[in-house]
Amino acid sequence: MEKNQYLCNSACYKLNWLVYEAPIMGFATLLYLTYLFIPILLLILGSFGQTWTNTLFPSGVTLGWYHELWTDGSFRRAFLVSMEVVTGTCVFCSLLAVPLAYSLYRSASKRVMVAARIVFLLPIAAPPLVLAFGFILVFTSDAAPWLGSVWLLVAGHVVLTLPYLLQTLVSDMRHLGLEELEAAAESLGAGFGRRFRDIVLPLLRHSLGSGLIMVAALSIGEFQLSNLIAGFLYRPYPVVLLQAFYGATGFACAATVILLALALLASAGGALMARFASR
Amino acid sequence: MSLTIERLNFRYPGTDIGVHDINLSIGHGELLAVIGSSGSGKTTLLKLIAGFETADNGRVFIDGEDITRLPVRHRRLGIVFQSYALFPHMTAWENVAYPLKLRKRGQRERRDKAFEALARVGLAGFEDRRPPILSGGQQQRVALARALVFAPKILLLDEPLSALDASLRGEMRDEILRLQREFDIATIHVTHDQEEALSMADRVAVMESGRLVQVATPLELYDNPATRSVAGFVGESNLWDGAVVSEDTVEVAFGLLKTEPHGFGIGRRVTVMVRPENVRIGGGEDGCNHFHGTVVRDRFFGATRRYDLAVGAGIILGQTGQRRPIESVKICPKDVRLLES
């Protein structure tokens, strides 16, 4: 009797889930995905539409907007600048983040840990706008007149994205128990350099890869800082994209779709680079 | 090779925790187990020998050579870590070959020696597997092969069996002992499991609050513990507070207890130790101490049974293989040990 009661309860729970909970959860997920993908879908549709004025969907089909984008020198140049900035950001972030994360992980000092926490919170505590004004003040001086250069854009993007990569690396080091693995390597005869090359770097390849995907995606879409510190010669893609919205809708859609593709491409490139670097 | 430790002292900065005045020596081919409760300093002692911590003062010698200030990587010690610390991105044979790679041996030689070492620990056929897909016992064997492949001077084992299932522990205990004998290497085995220490070691060192309290053979340690805490830590025992009333009698909470001549002064407060297996069921006029009481707790372990017999104001813990009801027990004078209180 007791067993039957239990079975009935178990079956009832399952039925309850199927009838009430599953449809609600499914609907909520669908709603969220729709909210996420509809703007992207509309952008893609708009980029192929001939005209789009005060209607739900565009009318006519054309590849003209992409052709116009391709022949527009400022967009082509911005595209290349963005690729340069993303590559530079990924390279410098990798070079800085791995040793920095390692020092943070191995440091037992409380002060260092507090400093690390501040660095981790920097992107939230100091918005890009604040950082941009700081850059303008410093890099318009005669001592460092570099405002408007690609290198300054890279430096700005490194400051903004480094904390994310650092966080990914430090948590992976903790998860791997790197300290004990290094102690084992040391007891077998490995000096610091060998341990770093043979143990630390290969073990971090996955988190470095995923961290660089994030860095690349953030860098390619960065607008606030870039808009203020980029000069006329080296404007990255999102900055130039803003101009497109003052023109035809189809052209703006096509330019945005290219930015989206660029972000995906940069992410894939970042991951590939990390894998190559770890070999 | 032998290991000697002289007046070794170490404190973690800003605390009183560490190890104090450690003197110890381990002969060639000897297996010394270091036991103690958590925080007793046994792992710190291992770290000092390995070189992961540097002693405040005192010295560590291997075969007469002072290695106290030598960096870890130059000490040539084989260490098996509690978590095994196998490199997850390398295969089993690459793990084992790593110390040989560091010693610049050729690829062919490294591979051959690693395969041979893995075969010696019973892992032939597992060479190309990565640690995450090996079982706990197999990982343990890889760790042992890696620690032994480069002919280390001393083998250090840091609680190597604690991460294993109880069923595997016995098997690995025999395996470690077999390899230790085969390689004929001085070994320090740190563990909190006293059964493991007693069954494997040639000698056992007991640590307490950072100090060595007793170093003895397993038999000596079990039969004649130096202090009450050692007696409590090594095996089960009755430990009663007592007072000496004559040269062969002590008084405990539940009456007088005859002992063999003990050498303690009359009136002296002592700890009376009796192992549960020396508490025998039944009576009779045989010169032993007899007590009547009631069993207040009875635990069945299969081959043995452990019971608490309430006698007056005290409890006698006994152990027997018999299953019959218990009303009286006897404790013979030769089984009573008196310890400093």
Image: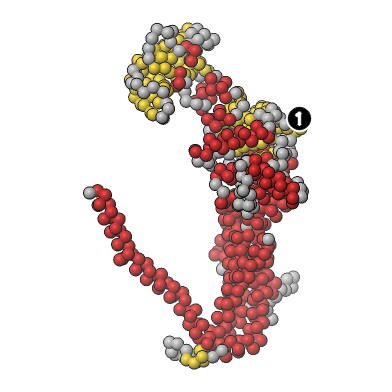
Q: Which residue appears farthest toward the left when viewing the image?
A: A1
The vertical placement of A104 against A259, above or below, is above
- Nearer to me, A235 or B165: B165
The vertical placement of B44 against A273, above or below, is above
Residue A98 locus on image (x, y percent): 65, 58
Residue A55 locus on image (x, y percent): 43, 89
Residue depicted at x 46% and y 74%: A36
The vertical placement of A35 against A159, above or below, is below
- Nearer to me, A89 or B120: B120
Residue A218 quadrant: bottom right
Residue B114 locus on image (x, y percent): 68, 46
Element type where label 1 sits in the image: loop
Residue depicted at x 60% and y 52%: B130
Res. B247 in view:
yes
Describe residue A183's horizontal placement relative to residue B258 as left or right: right
Describe residue B157's horizontal placement relative to residue B167 as left or right: right
Q: Which residue has dot 1 on it?
A: B64
In the image, what residue type sits under mark 1? Gly
Q: Chain of mark 1?
A: B
**Classed neighbour count for the residue bearing mark 1: other residues with Cα under 10 Å, few (<14), some (14–19), many (≥20):** few
Residue B134 locus on image (x, y percent): 56, 49
Res. A102 in view:
no
Query: Which quarter of the rendered picture does the N terminus of chain B lie within?
Result: top right
- Nearer to me, B314 or A248: B314
Residue depicted at x 63% and y 78%: A236
